[in-house]
Amino acid sequence: MPPVFLLAVGRKRIMVARKEGTVLSKVDIMADTLHRWQTLWESTPKAAWTRTLIPDLSKWWHHGPRQITFHMAQILTGHGCFQQYLWSRNRAHSPACLLCPAEADDAEHTLFICMFWSGERRELEQSLGRTLRPEDVSSILCGPALADLPDDPHTKRRIILAANRRKQLFAQMVKDIMGRKEELERERQHNKINAIL
């Protein structure tokens, strides 16, 4: 959802246009709002990881998923059971991955690099025909642009079905990895408490 202040700017433009006797379409207002949001998105130092995964807000707005699961939100924001995130909030002793020798366990490491999760990535990577990369997330979750699809209905259907399958595989992979990471974190915290007692 675009920032509230940008939505307010759009509503104000509609009211001003009405007073002046002109009409602005909601489509034009939303296009302008998305353009302003994109400009803001590209200029902020915040949310760098999310911006890596979702570089084009208009594509995300028009074609992205309408609902995001809890685990998907953790991956998209980098806020979750990642040792680096927990360490930054004084909830872990180190930012290092507990499952491999990596010095930092963040969303990128977990989803794309850590060998511990290679089994969870396998089916999606086979579908892609290559290693999964952060740049793939937007196209996986948004699917192909309809304008880019071929005219042949059979080929178009095959491409759309493959894209939907990849989206399902990605969602399942995220659910499996993040669910298991949460279990491992609960075990770690339980063991820590037992060691104190």
Image: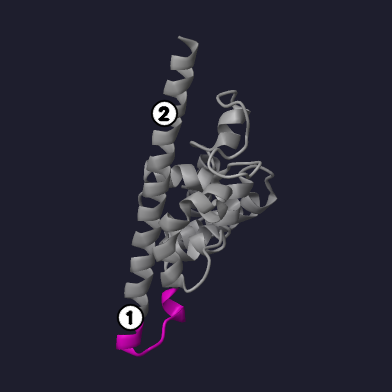
- Give, as a single range, the part of the protein colored magenta: 145-156
At 43% from the left and 35% from the top, the residue drawn is 184
Q: State the CA–CA distance, disc 1 to disc 2.
A: 43 Å
Q: Nearer the viewer, residue 6 or 190?
A: 190
Which quadrant of the view contains residue 119? Answer: bottom left
Q: Amino acid at mark 1?
A: Arg
User: Could you say where residue 158 lies in the image, as x and y percent from the top left?
Assistant: 33, 80
Mark linked to residue 57: none
Which quadrant of the view contains residue 39? Answer: bottom right
Quadrant of the image containing the C terminus:
top left
User: Could you say where residue 106 lies in the image, as x and y percent from the top left?
Assistant: 58, 43
Residue 160 relative to residue 24: left or right: left
User: Could you say where residue 7 lies in the image, as x and y percent from the top left?
Assistant: 50, 46
Q: Nearer the viewer, residue 145 or 97?
A: 97
Residue carrying label 1:
158
Residue 117 relative to residue 51: left or right: left
Q: Is residue 149 magenta?
A: yes
Near mark 2 (Cα within 10 A), the count class, few <14, some 14-19 or many ≥20, is few
| Residue found at the very far bottom of the displayed protein | 152
Q: Specify whether residue 12 is in view.
A: no
Q: Nearer the viewer, residue 106 or 153?
A: 106
